[in-house]
Amino acid sequence: QVQLMESGGGLVQAGGSLRLSCAASGSGFSIDTMAWYRQAPGKQREQVAAVSSGGATNYADAVWGRFTISRDNAENTMWLEMNNLKPEDTAVYYCYARVVIGTHKYQYWGQGTQVTVSS
């Protein structure tokens, strides 16, 4: 069983910064793609940024140039550095991992961490 644990959310003023972390625990697995998603009240969950096991990254247009995603494959940990935060970044942020166990791939989600940006 694989578990994802997020941390680092909170309340920050517009223009401020936060750093989210996601750690995967368990045994007998490797991780393919990791990503951060977010869901604001009344809106659909959207992908914010993704990073492959090889380090290739992808960002949503709304966060390009402000957010940076990174990961440590050896530690099965991922981070999201969020700078110049805006009120529209307010949402619950979820960690996502596509986990490889043997020849199968599974999708795992964290429990979510709240990010609130005040104007």
Image (cartoon, grey):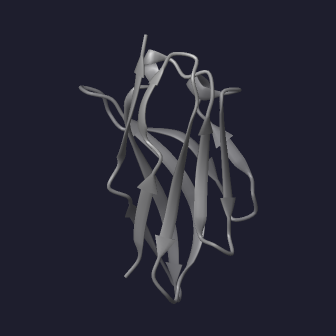
Residue 7: percent from left, percent from top? 45, 52
Quadrant into which the N terminus falls:
bottom left
Nearest the eye: 52 or 70: 70
Residue 33: percent from left, percent from top? 59, 61
Residue 96: percent from left, percent from top? 46, 56
Residue appearing at x 60%, y 51% in the figure: 79
Query: Would you place residue 58 above or below residue 27 in this image?
Result: above
Residue appearing at x 38%, y 58% in the figure: 110
Residue appearing at x 61%, y 21% in the figure: 84
Res 92 quadrant in image: top left
Disc count in the image?
Answer: 0
Quadrant into which the C terminus falls:
top left
Is residue 101 toward the left or the right of residue 38 in the image? right
Residue appearing at x 53%, y 53% in the figure: 21
Query: Would you place residue 45 above or below residue 40 in this image?
Result: below
Nearest the eye: 56 or 114: 114
Query: Would you place residue 44 above or below residue 74 in this image?
Result: above
Res 65 quadrant in image: top right
Residue 48: percent from left, percent from top? 53, 38
Nearest the eye: 48 or 6: 6
Res 3 quadrant in image: bottom left
Is residue 23 toward the left or the right of residue 50 in the image? left
Residue placed furthest toward the left: 42
